Each structure stands twice: as structure tokens, then as C-alpha cells.
Image (cartoon, grey):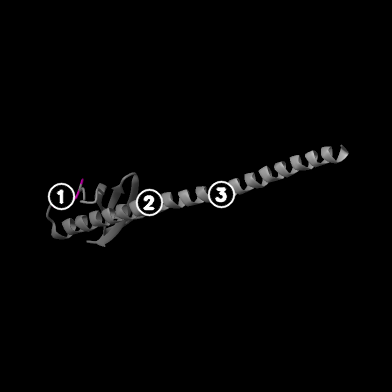
Amino acid sequence: MNKLIKINKESGVSVFLALLILTGILAIALGIVSLVLSEFKTSANLDDSVKAIFAADSGVECKLMEVRSSSSFICNNLTFSNGSDIDFLDAIDNRQCDGDSQQNTKAVKAIGAFNKVKRSLCSEQGV
């Protein structure tokens, strides 16, 4: 009779240990899944960021062409075929990109946007 009671106590401990091990394995698996999902999100944001930076670069190039040729192109509010656009475009006389003033310099700034990502570029040109 004493052996039967002792066996039942030991089997309860083994069930507890099995549940403890399964809980640990589940926690590790959930951690790995969380890391993979965050990497997918980062990867998607990187793709959007690249499209936004190329839109800003196109805006700077368009504005520089406008400044160099002294003609009026339609550079503001451009939307490209991939869905990116230029939010802000400006050419500021006698300024550098960092905001310092310098004679005979023009700072051209553009902000490209794609989805909810915005990237800014600034270029300086001597006049």
C-alpha cells in the first residue's frame, strides 16, 4: 500500500516537470516568432525608406535643373509611378544645408515620402 502512494506522488512530479519543460519550449518559440516578425517589419520599412529617399533625390535634381536653367519646371507636388511623392521642395539663396549663411550659395532641399516614411535630402550649389 505504501508503494502505491509513493508512485502516485512521483507521477505528479513528472507531470509538473513535463509542463515546466513545455512552458520553457513555448516561451523560446514565441521569442523566436517575435524576432522574425520584427525583422519582417524592419525589412518592409527599409523598402519604403529607399523609395522615399529616391523621391527626395529626384526632387533635388528637378529643382537644381530649374535653378541652373532659370526656367520654371513643375517640381513641387510630384507623384511618381511607384506611389512616392515629393512633399516639400525649396531653393534658399545664400544658405547652406546646415542653415549657416554663405554668399553665392543656394541650398536645395526636398522631402520624399512613400507610405508613412519621409526622407529628406539637401544639396548645395554655388551660384
**Tag on residue 29?**
3
Label 3: element kind: helix
**Mark 1 to mark 2 CA distance (whole Å):** 31 Å
Q: Quadrant of the C terminus?
A: bottom left
Q: Residue furthest front?
A: 1
- Within the magenta stretch, is there residue 52? no
User: Which circle, 1 or 2, is nearer the viewer?
Assistant: 2
Label 1: element kind: loop
Residue 110, position as x, y percentages in the image: 28, 51
**Mark 3 to mark 1 CA distance (whole Å):** 53 Å
User: Which circle, 3 or 1, is nearer the viewer?
Assistant: 3
* First-in-chain label (3 vs 1): 3
Residue 100, position as x, y percentages in the image: 35, 54
* First-in-chain label (3 vs 2): 3
Above or below — where is 100 with respect to 26? below
Tell me the amino acid under the disc marked 2: Ala
Q: Quadrant of the N terminus?
A: top right
Q: Nearer the viewer, residue 63 or 55?
A: 55
Residue in the picture at 34% in, 44% down: 116
Highlighted range, magenta: 73-77
**Tag on residue 74?**
1
Q: Residues within 10 Å of mark 3 (few under 14, many from 20)?
A: few
**Tag on residue 117?**
none
Label 2: element kind: helix
Residue 31, position as x, y percentages in the image: 55, 48
**Mark 3 to mark 2 CA distance (whole Å):** 23 Å
Query: What residue did someone put label 2 on?
Result: 44
Name the main secondary structure of what is drawn in magenta. Answer: loop
Q: Residues within 10 Å of mark 2 (few under 14, many from 20)?
A: few
